Image (cartoon, rainbow, N blue to C red):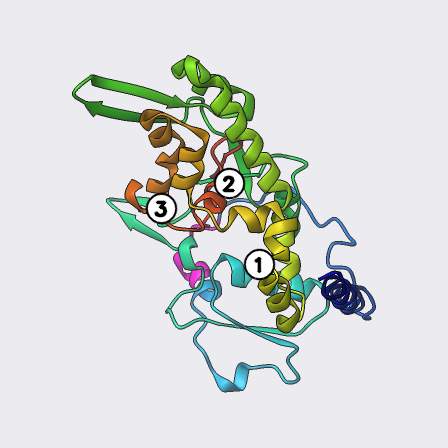
Amino acid sequence: MWLTVLLLALLLLAGLRRVYLGLFSGNSPNPFAEDVKRPPESLVTDKEARKKVLKQEFSASRVPEKLDAVVIGSGIGGLASAAILAKAGKRVLVLEQHTKAGGCCHTFRENGLEFDTGIHYVGRMREGNIGRFILDQITEGQLDWAPMASPYDLMILEGPGGRKEFPMYSGRKQYIQGLKEKFPKEEAVIDKYMELVKVVARGAPHAILLKFLPLPLTQLLNKFRLLTRFSPFCRASTQSLAEVLQQLGASPDLQAVLSYIFLTYVLGLELCATKPGFVVLESTPRPSCMLGKHPAN
């Protein structure tokens, strides 16, 4: 047993060394070496000017030679990856099957008003947050963010006992305090739940690290259950949100309030039984959400 663990540890160290050399030993410049953030410019509303950027039809003659990377899909993930690679000095081509780039950042107009199709509130966008820093550098600070009103949402439960309202407050402390005011007998459950969320959040980088390790090594770690043993994030990924809430002893109403955010993903509460449910919930923007001003544009 110990010999197996030692062998796996050596393989893991070899994998980490490979990751380190791959990330830091190359000649590519640091994409974030220079702060490129600048004051936001006026919003571009001219349709023709926007089309020149968003609706560039594919032509083989326009494809640069000696590409370093080809990104399939121009959604937020694809564009962010391509932008960072380009900032690191790489020649990048982004391909999109839709007639317009942007993914869920598309917009549409109705009755003279413009609407975003996918972006509403986004978590972890406060000043000093790593997500905010990366987005500021990718967009050169052209996205302007504003804190949401508090409460920013209202959940309503109706049943034989009547109508119950549960306001959702911005800010972690305010959010927790709001829960405890509505569920004074379940303060201990709420504290345990929020502590579990914090533990899982700290372990999220483990999932990112696994993407860099050789697949056979990751499969070995998983086979011997070392991932779930040493990583809170991986361990939580084996549980559904419903399982976590039931283990904590949360009342049906508290379970509903803590899982209501799944409606944001157009999922009914019955689908909270899916296995990655708790990890997905951990990444939701409830306590620290921000509103973008024209984020899709």
Q: Residue at x 53, y 27 (%)?
A: 192
Residue type at mark 2: give it: Glu
The image quadrant that residue 127 belongs to is top right
Give the left or right position of residue 45, taking residue 172 as reference: left
Cα–Cα gap, marks 1 and 3: 31 Å
Residue behind mark 3: 273
Residue type at mark 1: give it: Ala
User: Closer to us: mark 2 or mark 3?
Assistant: 3
Q: Earlier in the sequence, mark 2 or mark 1?
A: 1
Residue behind mark 1: 80
Front residue (pair 294, 209) = 209
Residue behind mark 2: 282
User: For numbered disc 3, what is the local secondary structure?
Assistant: helix
**Contact, CB < 8 Å: mark 2 with mark 3?**
no
Q: Is residue 102 visible?
A: yes
- Mark 1 surroundings: few (<14), some (14-19) or many (≥20) residues within 10 A: some
Q: Looking at the picture, how far across and down is residue 188, in whole percent?
A: 50, 20
Front residue (pair 16, 216) = 216
Q: Residue at x 25, y 25 (%)?
A: 157
